[in-house]
């Protein structure tokens, strides 16, 4: 089977062979994911499988690694762009080490360290984001997938959607929704929107629905120990060991050695972060995703269905009373909150439905402090009286009507809570899947 060529805008991963056997290959890969699943790439290359590697950015925003590499500060948009081109060259050398051909690689060129800002705020009639170091508002690289594309959410989704439609992958390896790096978790979210947008096409004409294999890179205190320990296994963070079904793929000695050599090709990053990056050179690689929180049944007596969100120690309840509106309720046990600083809770709820462009859907940010609660939609402050925030000494409850989210299908829920464990206080995203029948009953 031929590898799909890169035309206007495309993306990634893998398909079945002509005989119908299951093929493994690599997919969406963000620039700084140096712990990426090189194992999958090596297997795909060895079996001569179709694959595509997609870099969402050129990695042009890392002042510390630039300083270590160049031995002097890298300042100014043009200098930053040169470092982005250097990172591109390093990525091509690394993937070549793994046997990937140049025509199997795509660089989208969106702004490094700004993807979460785009995800949160830059949609529809909002202006494009501005690169934090490059100060660009559109893709500045002439060899990118779509030079000149504005730094906006719908543009990223369109590029990913277009690549997916051409390549028709059956396995996608991508960064994790609980990754501490904001760019990494944003890639996961953009990819989910792109896949939902073409769900009908996937069902009707693709060989099968693609499987997602998220992999974690940045997480507080993980992995341990730091440094090169090739004889050790990579184990999941304790905070997510039970909430996620992790798949461990063993590596052969040759694959481990090749992965290390490929990693070293990212010289500008490896020189400044070798102890951390080398910690991913282990006996195996890990993949796993949070299950979607399915809301399919409502108790007739209680009128609510509850699920636990273990990673953040939250209780997420869905209420569909006989008298509308239905609402999502987020409950937090504040007895476990750290108290050394002023306490802030952050909740983001983005609704999704197929009949409304995602760029036009509400994207709420609810920020709760000890004194007040503020609500924003794509960076704009709202006076939203229908969102109820209740707080006492031991509990915090936030109730959001579904009609405020304009959603009857999916809800992205992002949370950051100042709980007693460092792991639980990091931002992570979950997906709530809604059954329209119980919402409309």
Image (cartoon, rainbow, N blue to C red):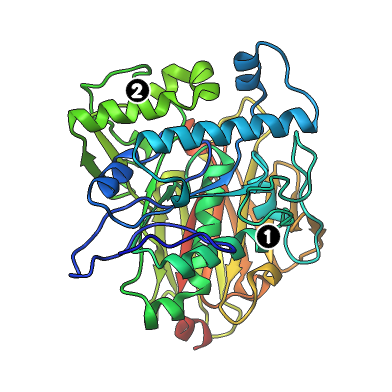
Residue at the spot 59% in from the left edge and 68% down from the top edge: 351
| For residue 295, above or below residue 52 | below
Above/below status of 378 relative to 95: below
**The residue tagged with tag 2: helix, strand or loop?**
loop
Front-most of residues 426 and 277: 277
Q: In this figure, which residue is indicated by the disc labeled 1?
A: 364
Q: Quadrant of the N terminus?
A: bottom left
Q: Secondary structure at mark 1?
A: strand
Q: Counting residues from the N terminus, which is met first, the one under dot 2 or under dot 1? A: 2
Residue 155: image quadrant is bottom right
Q: Position of residue 107 (x, y in %)?
A: 57, 48
Residue 224: image tag: 2
Q: Position of residue 236 (x, y in %)?
A: 32, 36
Residue farthest bottom in this picture: 441
Image mark count:
2
Left or right relative to 65: residue 243: left
Q: Is residue 362 above or below residue 50?
A: below
Q: Is residue 238 visible?
A: yes
- Which of discs 2 and 1 lies nearer the camera? The answer is 2
Q: Position of residue 241 (x, y in %)?
A: 31, 41
Q: Residue at x 37, y 33 (%)?
A: 97
Mark 1 closeness class: few <14, some 14–19, many ≥20 residues within 10 Å = many
The front one of 102 and 243 is: 102
């Amino acid at each position: 089977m031929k590898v799909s060529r890169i035309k206007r805008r495309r993306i990634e991963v893998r398909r079945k062979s002509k005989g119908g056997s299951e093929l493994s290959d690599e997919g969406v890969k963000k620039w700084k994911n140096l712990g990426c699943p090189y194992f999958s790439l090596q297997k795909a290359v060895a079996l001569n499988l179709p694959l595509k590697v997609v870099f969402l950015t050129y990695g042009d925003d890392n002042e510390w690694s630039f300083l270590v590499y160049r031995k002097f500060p890298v300042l100014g948009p043009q200098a930053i762009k040169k470092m982005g081109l250097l990172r591109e060259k390093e990525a091509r050398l690394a993937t070549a080490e793994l046997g990937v051909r140049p025509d199997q690689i795509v660089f989208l060129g969106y702004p490094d360290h700004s993807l979460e800002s785009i995800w949160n705020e830059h949609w529809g009639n909002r202006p494009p984001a501005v690169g934090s170091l490059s100060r660009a508002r559109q893709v500045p690289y002439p060899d990118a997938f779509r030079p000149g594309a504005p730094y906006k959410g719908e543009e990223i989704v369109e590029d990913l959607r277009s690549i997916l439609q051409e390549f028709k992958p059956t396995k996608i390896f991508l960064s994790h929704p609980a990754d501490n790096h904001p760019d990494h978790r944003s890639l996961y979210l953009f990819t989910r929107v792109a896949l939902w947008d073409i769900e009908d096409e996937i069902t009707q004409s693709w060989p099968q629905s693609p499987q997602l294999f998220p992999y974690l890179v940045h997480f507080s205190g993980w992995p341990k120990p730091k440094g090169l320990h090739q004889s050790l296994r990579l184990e999941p963070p304790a905070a997510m060991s039970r909430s996620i079904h992790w798949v461990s793929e063993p590596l052969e000695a040759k694959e481990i050695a090749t992965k290390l050599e490929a990693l070293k090709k990212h010289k500008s990053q490896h020189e400044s972060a070798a102890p951390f990056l080398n910690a991913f050179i282990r006996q195996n690689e890990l993949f796993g995703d949070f299950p979607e929180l399915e809301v399919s049944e409502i108790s007739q007596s209680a009128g609510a269905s509850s699920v636990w969100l273990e990673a953040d120690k939250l209780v997420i309840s869905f209420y569909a009373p006989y008298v509308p509106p239905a609402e999502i309720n987020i409950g937090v046990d504040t007895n476990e909150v750290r108290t050394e600083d002023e306490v802030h809770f952050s909740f983001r709820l983005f609704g999704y439905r197929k009949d409304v462009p995602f760029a036009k859907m509400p994207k709420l940010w609810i920020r709760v402090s000890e004194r007040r609660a503020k609500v924003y939609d794509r960076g704009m402050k709202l006076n939203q009286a229908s969102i109820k925030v209740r707080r006492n000494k031991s509990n915090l409850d936030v109730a959001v009507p579904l009609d405020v989210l304009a959603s009857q299908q999916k809800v992205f829920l992002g949370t950051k809570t100042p709980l007693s464990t460092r792991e639980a206080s990091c931002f992570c995203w979950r997906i709530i899947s809604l059954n329209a029948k119980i919402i409309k009953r």
